[in-house]
Amino acid sequence: MEEEAAFSTIADDDAGSTLVLTGPWVVATAGAVDRLLRTYEDPVARVDLSQVSAFDTVGAWVAWRFAREKGAELVGVDDKAAVLIEAVEENRSVADIHAPRAHILERVPAAMGEFVIGWAIGVVQILGFFGAILVSLGSLLLHPSRFRVTSIVRQVELVGVSALGIIGLMSFLIGIVIAQQGAVQLAQFGAEALTVNLTGRISLRELGVLMTAIMVAGRSGSAFAAQIGTMKLTEEIDAMRTIGISPIEALVIPRILAAVFMMPLLGFYSAGMAIVGGAVISDLTLDIPFFTFLTRIQEVVPEHDLWVGLIKAPVFGLIVAMSGCYQGMQVKGNAEEVGLRTTMAVVQAIFMVIVLDAFFAVFFTEIGWG
Amino acid sequence: MNAPHTHTGPFEGDFPIVVEGLTTAFGEHVIHRDLDLKVRKGEILGVVGGSGTGKSVLMRAIIGLQRAEAGQIDVLGHSILASLSDASDDEMRSRWGVLFQGGALFSTLTVGENVEVPLREFYPEISDQLRHEIACYKVRLSGLPEEAANKYPSELSGGMRKRAALARALALDPELLFLDEPTAGLDPIGAAGFDRLIRELTDTLGLTVFLITHDLDTLYEICDRVAVIADRKVIAIGTIDELVATDHPWIQEYFNGPRGRNAQASQARKPAGGKPAMDKHGGEGA
């Protein structure tokens, strides 16, 4: 059965009262008794340890600290207790165990300043990273034998082939939503037939590529950052450098090429699946037969819509892969950093993709590809 | 904690760790077969063996991280294999400290906060102030300067990290301390300092230490007895003098190889007073 640490006071002496400690004074029992002792107000002249049944450094610390606070003398100390008390007394310290933390008035402006400077440095570093990639690509073109074909094929599989299932399903469902919701609105003008135009044009121009870029950022951009970041932590990147392998050439280029090549294919595939989804739902709810829907797509969607999607796709792929690899290369310190950088890679990639998409939308309309 | 901690007194028996007939395996690959080992109370037991002989696996089996295929492991009078999910396990875990090979400090916490983690986990009733005080003296007790308490593990040198990990292992005033190659990767001065620290703490706190090492100096310097693992079992256990007297070829090569001789010679050069109680328990077989 559990015993408690306890103390009792004997106040029969001229020289002041004695606090007699009883029971086990160990880490398991010290918490409760320490609270009582910290609020103990009467003067104590002696602390008697002779009745203590078990003692460890925590018990020793609690008893010693109390005795020192009261200016009391420790009595009834056996050899073992004496050793423990000496150990805690010698090693007492009042160090701060938490990392230093500035006042909020200092911390907030400092954090803002660091954020702004970090942004500026980040822009310069990303430009530098882009430059390093271009230099590497250039030197690879001069020495094509250094191309890591296996590595590229592997990344193509990871970025492209294994994403087919999820991207196909997502696009199919989005096609259904666009066609179905679009039809509801267009029906108010008696223009259900335009559902075909809506689904076809929005899939090929915007949504196919945009949704694919977001999915690739979540699937592959994050993976790039986490892989490269972990390799950074385990000093694999440094090892590569010392052996004379450029990490940009070996790790970054294959990932970027894979993303740049796969994005147009995935984007086109995604648009196709969205159109199929739209056709299926139109067949079921709008009385537009499946194949009629597909034939109408050919008639109503201008060819330049396809080109708009296909031109945007590799740019988005480049952004997603670059931010993944860049954030991975920035990892240093600890495991938390890998998580942080992975999150940043995905957020940065999606944000940049959407910003660029807005530019592209305005640009293509201006050049008459509306 | 949902169950009260029932241990309020130290373990009274003679053998805090008793391993009998232990068999462990990874799939088809058998690591230990019928391994027996008894660790005496209050001793520092060195565990040696070639790479891959399962020293760390034995330690992991004893602390319940590695499943045993067969056999019996009693730690502080409780069977480890019988109950791996009971509340009594938490109680057991509060009675031993483990120093992993790489330190295994939590990288997002400072050294002091690392020491606080087991205290917070096992004894939430301890007030913040007392916990802070305990963490501070444990850091100092492990031979770290006061300033190290609020540093992150990544800001410390290898030797300091080992000491910080030791401080965390000692956080709950354990009766048993498991050390996996504590001096590996330390410079000779740091390693010698760490050896001394372990010896001092063992004597001060009354610990029983299970120490895996490749470091011959550590063996000569601080171990009361040494257990040799080879051929999937403990082939010999005793003081170094006793081991050297056996004629097993691996033991002979280990202690009488060039490095063994050096360690032995440097030990012999020491003044008699600095020699730890090597033969305190000598002469009796396990």
Image: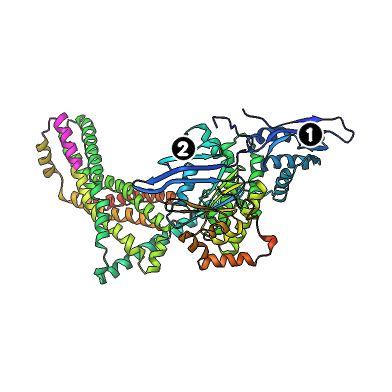
- The answer to whether A370 appears left or right of B19 in the picture is left
Residue B122 placement (x, y as % from top left): 57, 37
**Quadrant housing residue B230:** bottom left
Range covered by the magenta-colored residues: A273-289
Instruction: Return the chain for callout 1.
Output: A
Q: To which residue does mark 1 refer?
A: A19
Say what amino acid the circle numbered 1 marks: Leu
- Looking at the image, the residue that sits furthest to the top is A1
Helix, strand or loop at label 2? It is loop
Residue topped by disc 2: B81
Crowd class of label 2 (few under 14; some 14 to 19; many from 20; radius 10 Å): many
CA gap, disc 1 and disc 2: 44 Å
Residue A3 image position (x, y, % from top left): 65, 29
Residue A206 x/y as whole percent:
25, 46
Position of residue A144 measured from the top left corner of the image (x, y, whole percent): 24, 69
Q: Is residue A256 above or below residue A137?
A: above
Amino acid type at circle 2 is: Leu
Q: Inspect this view and state whether residue A330 appears.
A: no
Label 1 packing within 10 angstroms: few (<14), some (14-19), many (20+): many
